[in-house]
Amino acid sequence: MGANDDTLSRRTYLKATGAASAAGLGSLSGFVGQDGGTLEVQHWWTGGDGGQAISALFEGFKQQYPNVTVNENPVAGGAGQNLHTVIKKRVLNNNPPSTWQDWPGANLTPYTEAGVLKDIESSVWDRNDMKNAYLEGPKQVAQPAGNYVTVPLNIHRLNNLFYNVEVVEQAGVDPTSFSGPSDVLSAVETVESETDAAGMAHQTQSPWSTLQLWETELLARHGQSTYQQFADGNVGAVESQVKDALRGVKQYRQYFNDDAGSIGWTEANSKIIKGEAAFIHQGDWAAGMYRSQDGFEYEQHWNQVSYPGTSGQYSLVIDSFPFPKNNPSPDATTKFLRYVGSVDGQRRFNPKKGSIPPRTDVPRDAFGPFLQSQMDDFQNAEVQPPSTAHGLAVPPETLTNLEDAMATFNSSWNVDRAYDGIVQAFQ
């Protein structure tokens, strides 16, 4: 889930493009490959919900475009980090795939600064009524430098608070009554005093879970404008709010499961299924584990609320497919990106992935009741802030630095030191 440590700096990109020019290859931004008819797509969905979903997407694409040969070239592992490394090297070597799975928004900044992504507004976004069907949040992150360079396929929501129904009922707490983070803190205290369960399931083995909990606390306590100032790097202007959210996360620490430092997020999430913890803050991918667990039913055994204090907000975690200028199959890639942005493509992919479509006109019948409720929240959201922990709000190098700051926070729980790390992340 986290960022790739092997980040691609603007300096590295520009050196590479300069070297290519010097070698007589032309700049990456100006070179246009020939369409060999073979579409090479790289992604990290190799198993589970993701594997089933991308297979359904390719199946639908092949039905519409039977003459396009698809070379599916997945790169497993590292929650996408291995793929990031492969793509970076391929782009620098002037040999990108036709397209690849990547986070949109600020995550694509190194590519846009190097001028290696194509403007696909007229060729893709002006087709399939995409501009009207996509809400502003997904459209904005598709334009990291002011022009459309990528197509969002799915949306996961980050500001969820999931809970085990039996545990919270045993503790006598009602999550639907929560209005802010202080209510969550009070509830986890009550859970631990009234039950044998941990108040909040969490993992601190890697920093991204704490980073996403902190960004959600910042939104819940201080709103979108404060969050945007942080994401823009104006951390000093919101110092008190940033520290307040860090203190909020620190308060939960004593209510985490005892093995938080030695497990991953799936093990933490399984504590909700087993009734060993009451609450967990996670993206809605957590519900995929609940859905696959026999006898663990939505509303009866598990449920969720918008993270208290973030009602009307829909924190975006998005996967997209960009269009590199030096493209080995421009015609086939254009067709594929149009399909990624189509009703049919998103109808096939998202129910299996456990995500919702960025388009608002995809039929709801293929989605279960939980995802239908997420679709309602998305369409009614007043603001759709892009996630920091999942690469949309800040560039890759900044994200790596923020993860370093949170790794230190996980080990020391020192608010001032964590704040200093957040400031330095943008420098």
Image: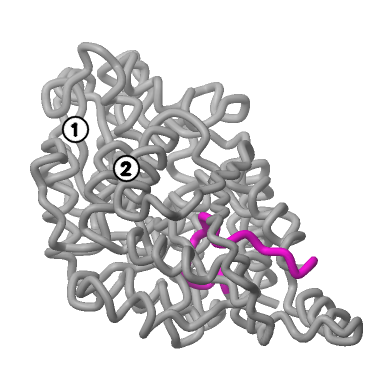
Residue 422 horizontal/vertical position (percent): 62, 66
Count how many numbered circles sit on residues in the image.
Answer: 2
Q: Secondary structure at mark 1?
A: strand
Residue beneath disc 1: 303
Reply yes or no: does residue 366 show up in magenta.
no
Q: Is residue 78 left or right of residue 297?
A: right
Q: Secondary structure at mark 2?
A: loop
Residue stretch rendered in magenta on the structure: 93-108
The quarter of the rendered structure image containing the C terminus is bottom right
Which residue is drawn at the image coordinates 73% and 78% (left, top)? Answer: 10
Q: Which mark is residue 284?
A: 2
Nearest the eye: 234 or 78:
78
Badge 1 vs badge 2, beta-carbon distance below 8 Å: no
- Can the viewer see residue 118 in this picture? yes
In the rendered view, would you say 122 is above or below 175? below
Q: Looking at the picture, which amino acid does disc 1 mark?
A: Asn
Around disc 1, counting alpha carbons within 10 Å, would you say few (fewer than 14), some (14 to 19), or many (20 or more)?
A: many
Around disc 2, counting alpha carbons within 10 Å, would you say few (fewer than 14), some (14 to 19), or many (20 or more)?
A: many
Residue 41 horizontal/vertical position (percent): 54, 52
| First-in-chain label (1 vs 2) | 2
In the rendered view, would you say 368 is above or below 405? above
- Residue 165: name its quadrant: top left
Nearest the eye: 375 or 333:
333
- Residue 133: name its quadrant: bottom left
Residue 220 horizontal/vertical position (percent): 31, 60
